[in-house]
Amino acid sequence: MDEITTLGLTAGTLTTVAFIPQLVKIWQSKSAGDLSWGMVLTFTTGVLLWFIYGITIDSLPVILTNAVTLLLQAGIISLKIKHG
């Protein structure tokens, strides 16, 4: 793996795992009322577009990290619907 790919995977991993504490907090508190639907849906749409872009340019860091972020966002959205 080259240095640029490693850099991309590191950056993507850090920005992706940043959502885990939020997901855990919603899960534990059973409250997602403070999360704005506008932010959640805008961010999720952006991540989906980054994922599609990653597929288009065949970039493993972009594809992998945005796929994981989409899964985390799906969890946040489902908990927001349930506990919003």
Image: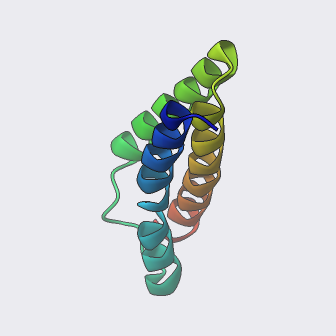
Q: Is residue 2 visible?
A: yes
- Classify 32 as above or below 55: below
- Quadrant placement of the C terminus: bottom left
Would you place residue 48 above or below residue 68 in this image? Answer: above
Residue 52 lies in what quarter of the image? Answer: top right
Nearer to me, 2 or 16: 2
Residue 35: horizontal and vertical position, in percent? 35, 58
Furthest-front residue in this view? 2
Residue drawn where x is 45% and y is 40% of the image: 7
What residue is at 56 percent from the left and 66 percent from the top? 79
Give the left or right position of residue 9, taking residue 43 as reference: right
User: Considering only vertical position in the picture, is 32 above or below 45?
Assistant: below
View extreme (bottom): residue: 28
Number of numbered discs on residues: 0
Taking the view exactly as shown, the residue that stands out farthest to the top is 56
Residue nearest the observer in this picture, 38 or 6: 6
Q: Is residue 44 visible?
A: no
Q: In this view, does 55 lie above or below 15?
A: above
The residue drawn where x is 51% and y is 35% is 47
In the rendering, at what x and y percent does residue 83 appear? 51, 71
At a point 48% along the width and 45% down the height, the residue shown is 12
Q: Where is residue 36 in the image (x, y as percent from the top left)?
A: 33, 51
